[in-house]
Amino acid sequence: MARRFSAPYQSEPVSSLATWSRNLAIFAVVAVIVSILIVRFGFLEMKPALATFFGALGLAVLSILLGLAAFAAIWQNGSRGMGRILLAFLINAVLLAYPAYLALQYRKLPAIHDITTDPVDPPRFEALARLRSGDGSNSAVYAGLYSAEQQRIAYPDIETVELEVPPQRAYDVALALVTRRKWLVIDERPPQPPRRVGRIEAVARTPIMGFREDVAIRITPDGEESRVDIRSSSRYFESDLGSNAARVSKLIEDINTAVDNAKPATKKPQAPAKAQAKTVKK
């Protein structure tokens, strides 16, 4: 049987601090959603969107402080509002969990934003260059040797993809994977004579906030085979928190898998049947 609160307790006033804590938590959620919509649909510039987002996180922190003050007040005077405090704490915990994870990633990972399989001659942003000329955006020029060295230390497995298929086949595989990921293709040039170098430029988005990260893929011939180089670079911020490296690594894995699965199965030549030894009757 459910326990009922006593009549004297029901007559106690609700803590105003508890009410404010809950209301601020709900308003912080609304502000975070608004900031995400601003970034994804480009309603405002990046700075106002980030100001809205960090302002929402500030409201969440203030809600927690008010909740703690309300808890102390309820403990002393016996007023109501514990349910509102618990609801505020739950909302704020969910709201602050992902930023807390990103803060840990920021401390752990190098502060770089430009990842490529070929730091010596990275794929260039050509069609994408004009999209990276706004206020506060990163340059279309590769980040340089410092970024390359930091990448080598943090992500040593990112390197050029060597495929035992012609450049056209490698290009088709890469373009199909870009299309499957629903990246916005800005430019696509299949490998054609005389150089037979294929290029794909596209815009990817981060999963939650939808920040734009530009991708360039270059397919070059290597005899009858091909080499695929990839570059992924954040359009904003000096640190990408590992998102570009994760994107490049996953794309490398998927390209290798797609090419391997498309190879025809080769039948091993059957060994000639051995003649049975004749038995001599004695």
Image (cartoon, rainbow, N blue to C red):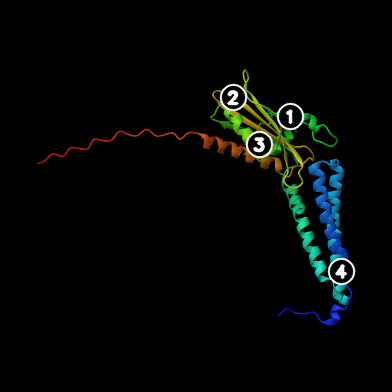
Q: Position of residue 142 (x, y in %)?
A: 74, 31
Q: Position of residue 247 (x, y in %)?
A: 67, 40
The quadrant holding residue 216 is: top right
The reply to whether callout 2 and callout 1 are in contact (CB within 8 Å) is no
Work out how far the residue at label 2 is from the one at label 1, CA to CA, in angstroms.
20 Å
The quadrant holding residue 81 is: bottom right
Q: Sequence order check: which comes first, mark 2 or mark 3? A: 3
Quadrant including the C terminus: top left
Look at discs 1 and 3 and give the one toward the viewer: 3
Q: Sequence order check: which comes first, mark 2 or mark 1? A: 1
Look at discs 3 and 4 and give the one toward the viewer: 3
Looking at the picture, tell me which residue is in the foreground, 10 or 274: 10
The reply to whether callout 1 and callout 4 are in contact (CB within 8 Å) is no
Residue type, mark 2 in image: Pro
Disc 4 element: helix
Residue drawn at x 56%, y 37% is 258
Quadrant including the N terminus: bottom right
Q: Which residue is mark 2?
A: 221
Q: Which residue is mark 4?
A: 70
Disc 3 element: helix
Residue 240 numbered mark, or none: none
Residue 179 numbered mark, or none: 3
Looking at the picture, tell me which residue is in the foreground, 14 or 215: 14
Neighbour tally class for label 3: few under 14, some 14-19, many 20 plus, Cα within 10 Å: few
Residue 125 numbered mark, or none: 1
Residue type, mark 4 in image: Ala
Q: Sequence order check: which comes first, mark 3 or mark 4? A: 4
